[in-house]
Image: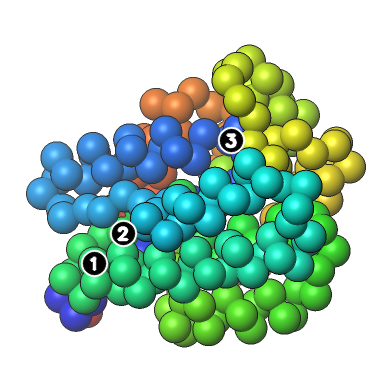
């Protein structure tokens, strides 16, 4: 933490509890006197919120490739406006989703060119990678049940058919297999158990990464 901040991405299918976990992590780390920024992709900036609105409210007008480029534009703005300044201020950044989501959703899920997505992600993220990825592994059927129980208006992704969700879930598993910066956590646990496990992983990782 002496030379730079610490970047954490929380990944998983919709309904896995990423947003709630990110705020639980923030509360824990703040109590430990860490300086923390919680953010999200996409929609973590004013521009991102407008792009998110376009995608979710006008999905029928957006082709799969345009969908990815809207998300990539959000990602570029997010890193320039939120992530990089926070890291330069030596803060811990906890983001609900990052570049890996596009590989899972638009790559494996939509069938777009995964190598090209990786290249554009790297450009949008200015070559920065998460120090730690927390992958909430949860069966997509369970995640979909949670989404339906939650009620409210569904996003354009949450209305997708089961086959799409299977491709996304399988994609995450392939993507994160043997990745050194990824730690898998059990999404079937309660949110408090999930947060406890995640926070211990983060503290251990920060200590190990100290010069």
Q: Which mark is residue 16?
A: 3
Mark nearest the camera among 1 and 3 is 1
Q: Earlier in the sequence, mark 2 or mark 3?
A: 3
Query: Is 110 on the left-hand or right-hand side of 81?
Result: right
| Picture coordinates of residue 80, whole percent (x, y) | 35, 74
Q: Position of residue 160 (x, y in %)?
A: 79, 39
Give the structural element (helix, strand or loop) at label 1. helix
Q: Tag on residue 86?
A: 1
Query: Disc 1 versus disc 2: distance between alpha carbons?
Result: 7 Å
Residue 101 sits above or below residue 5 on the image: above
Q: Are marks 2 and 3 in contact (CB under 8 Å)?
A: no
Q: Earlier in the sequence, mark 1 or mark 3?
A: 3
For label 2, the crowd category at 10 Å Cα-Cα, with few meaning under 14, some 14 to 19 and many 20 or more, is many
Residue at 45 percent of width and 27 percent of height: 191
- The residue depicted at 64 percent of the width and 69 percent of the height is 69
Q: Mark yes or no: residue 204 visible.
A: no
Q: In the structure shown, which secondary structural element does the residue marked by tag 3 occupy?
A: loop
Residue at figure coordinates x 49%, y 67% from the top left? 75
Q: Number of numbered discs present?
A: 3
Contact between labelled residues 2 and 1, with CB atoms less than 8 Å apart? yes
- Asked whether residue 29 is in view, the answer is yes
* Residue named by callout 2: 93
Q: Quadrant of the N terminus?
A: bottom left
């Amino acid at each position: 933490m002496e030379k730079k901040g610490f970047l954490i991405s929380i990944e998983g299918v919709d309904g896995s509890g990423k947003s709630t976990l990110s705020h639980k992590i923030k509360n824990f780390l703040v109590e430990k006197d860490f300086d923390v920024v919680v953010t999200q992709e996409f929609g973590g900036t004013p521009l991102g919120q407008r792009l998110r609105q376009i995608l979710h409210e006008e999905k029928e007008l957006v082709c799969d490739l345009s969908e990815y480029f809207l998300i990539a534009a959000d990602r570029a703005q997010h890193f320039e406006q939120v992530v990089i300044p926070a890291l330069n201020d030596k803060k811990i950044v906890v983001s609900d989703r990052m570049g890996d989501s596009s590989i899972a959703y638009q790559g494996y899920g939509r069938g777009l060119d995964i190598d090209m997505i990786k290249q554009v992600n790297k450009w949008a993220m200015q070559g920065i990678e998460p120090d730690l990825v927390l992958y909430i592994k949860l069966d997509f059927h369970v995640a979909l049940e949670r989404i339906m129980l939650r009620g409210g208006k569904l996003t354009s992704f949450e209305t997708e058919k089961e086959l799409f969700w299977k491709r996304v879930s399988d994609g995450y598993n392939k993507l994160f297999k043997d990745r050194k910066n990824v730690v898998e956590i059990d999404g079937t646990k309660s949110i408090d158990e999930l947060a406890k496990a995640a926070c211990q992983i983060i503290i251990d990782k920060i200590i190990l990464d100290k010069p």
